[in-house]
């Protein structure tokens, strides 16, 4: 006798599981915990088998009967519904494990130990904001160039052209990782050359006129914010590293005896270990900062938690607070300031400057120079640079005319 919805609703759990039959081998299994499960018995060959059709009320009586009828059709066509269901479940599982998001997160986990915390956070954001919502569930082997392009154009449509370029670059790294691990055959991002708008090169604002640099340094001297931010601002022009490298500076990397700051490869953009010679002035600032944060990991910790590095916007916010517009100067601008003045005013050879900027300088055979290349010359340059900045600062305070040291007197 066929079941009714009212009967199903009235079935109560008993001491043991029990069955309530419907029609054509369909029945409801009522568990002693109160759960109600649709089942269908059928014969396959010489074996009695049971097919699970879902849970009531998620699967209604009508839906259970429809599922039963579909299973009976498969059996008439010599297809075992249990085997087919298992195959489809395995296929879905395989697709989920080999989706773009699953492999993307696997790649992130593999790479993040070699990245700075800031870079890792940026990579996660690029994917979670721009790709995972659109192609994350797609099996990576089925993503075509048009599919990837459609996802990238959602970012491009916001006018974020540089972000689009970076997202495409990260996607390419994930696809190449998938190729290497046997999850797809090729990288579709390689086919998108010319399909996206090209972002215009953005140069970080920087003060490079000697007199203006002197005025900036006097403004930093008078900064009224926290001592940690002030010390970071004082050190920034002396070491001219990237802002993220300065923010994540650790006391374990500072060697006061050798007067060096040694940055490990995983913290560097070019993934090569780097040495920053510390001038007398830099040592003095760091000694002062050591009194404030020497017991913590980071030289310039966050005000909110000493276990975290200074916030990403701290230095730029301090410059804005001093009345310096973002069109005039940014924290990254200290690098352009040093590159310009070391060359044009102090006459240091460009390759020495580029080494100290941790740019990718290579020898005639194309090999990257190691971190100690030209170290004596760089030590001399960093001290003369610090002295030059002191000179600019002093002249700005006294409002004198700047008289530059002749380039020819600097020896390397």
Image (cartoon, rainbow, N blue to C red):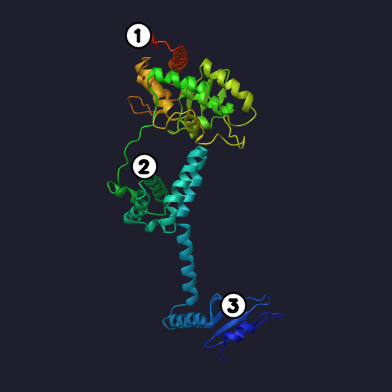
Mark found first going from the N terminus, 3 or 1: 3
What whole-number distance in Å separates the C-alpha atoms at marks 3 and 1?
91 Å
Mark found first going from the N terminus, 2 or 1: 2
Question: Counting other residues with Cα less than 10 Å from the Cα at mark 3, is it few (<14), some (14-19), or many (20 or more)?
Answer: many
Quarter holding the N terminus is bottom right
Nearer the viewer's eye, disc 2 or disc 1? Answer: 2
As helix, strand or loop, the secondary structure at mark 2 comes to helix
Q: Residue 275: where, in percent of width, then height? A: 48, 24
Q: Residue 406: where, in percent of width, then height? A: 36, 8
Q: Mark 3 highlights which residue?
A: 37
Asked whether the viewer can see residue 260, the reply is yes
Task: Find the residue positioned furthest to the left.
Answer: 194
Question: Counting other residues with Cα less than 10 Å from the Cα at mark 1, is it few (<14), some (14-19), or many (20 or more)?
Answer: few
As helix, strand or loop, the secondary structure at mark 1 comes to helix
Residue 162 is labelled as: 2
Nearer the viewer's eye, disc 2 or disc 3? Answer: 2
Q: Mark 1 highlights which residue?
A: 408
What whole-number distance in Å separates the C-alpha atoms at marks 2 and 1?
42 Å
Residue at point 32%, 48% (across, down):
190
Quarter holding the C terminus is top left
As helix, strand or loop, the secondary structure at mark 3 comes to strand
Q: Quadrant of residue 399?
A: top left
- Position of 230 compared to 171: left or right? right
């Amino acid at each position: 006798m066929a079941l009714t919805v009212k009967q199903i609703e009235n079935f109560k759990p008993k001491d043991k599981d029990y069955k309530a039959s419907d029609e054509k081998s369909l029945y409801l299994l009522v568990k002693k915990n109160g759960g109600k499960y649709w089942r269908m018995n059928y014969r396959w060959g010489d074996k009695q088998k049971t097919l699970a059709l879902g849970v009531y009320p998620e699967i209604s009586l009508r839906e259970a009967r429809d599922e039963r009828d579909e299973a009976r059709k498969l059996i008439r066509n010599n297809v075992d519904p249990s085997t087919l269901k298992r195959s489809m479940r395995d296929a879905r599982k395989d697709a989920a494990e080999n989706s773009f998001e699953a492999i993307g997160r696997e790649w992130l986990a593999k790479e993040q130990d070699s990245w700075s915390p800031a870079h890792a956070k940026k990579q996660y954001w690029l994917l979670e904001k721009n790709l995972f919502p659109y192609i994350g569930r797609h099996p990576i082997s089925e993503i075509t160039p048009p599919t990837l392009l459609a996802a990238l154009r959602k970012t491009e449509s916001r006018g974020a052209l540089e972000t689009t370029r970076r997202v495409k670059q990260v996607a390419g790294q994930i696809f190449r990782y998938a190729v290497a691990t046997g999850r797809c055959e090729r990288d579709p991002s390689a086919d998108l050359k010319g399909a996206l708008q090209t972002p215009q090169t953005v140069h970080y604002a920087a003060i490079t006129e000697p007199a203006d640099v002197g005025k900036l340094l006097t403004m930093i001297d008078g900064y009224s914010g926290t001592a940690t931010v002030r010390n970071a601002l004082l050190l920034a022009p002396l070491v001219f590293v990237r802002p993220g490298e300065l923010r994540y500076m650790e006391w374990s990397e500072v060697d006061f005896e050798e007067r060096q700051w040694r940055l490990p490869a995983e913290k560097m953009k070019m993934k090569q270990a780097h040495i920053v010679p510390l001038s007398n002035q830099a040592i003095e600032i760091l000694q002062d900062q050591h009194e404030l944060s020497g017991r913590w990991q980071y030289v310039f910790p966050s005000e909110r938690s000493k276990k975290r590095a200074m916030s990403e916007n701290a230095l730029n916010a301090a410059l804005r607070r001093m009345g310096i517009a973002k069109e005039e100067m940014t924290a990254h601008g200290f690098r352009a300031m040093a590159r310009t003045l070391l060359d044009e005013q102090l006459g240091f050879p460009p390759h020495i400057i580029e080494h100290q900027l941790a740019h990718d300088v290579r020898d005639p055979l194309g090999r990257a120079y190691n971190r100690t290349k030209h170290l004596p010359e760089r030590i001399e340059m960093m001290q003369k640079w610090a002295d030059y900045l002191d000179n600019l600062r002093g002249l700005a305070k006294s409002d004198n005319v700047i008289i530059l040291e002749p380039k020819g007197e600097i020896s390397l």
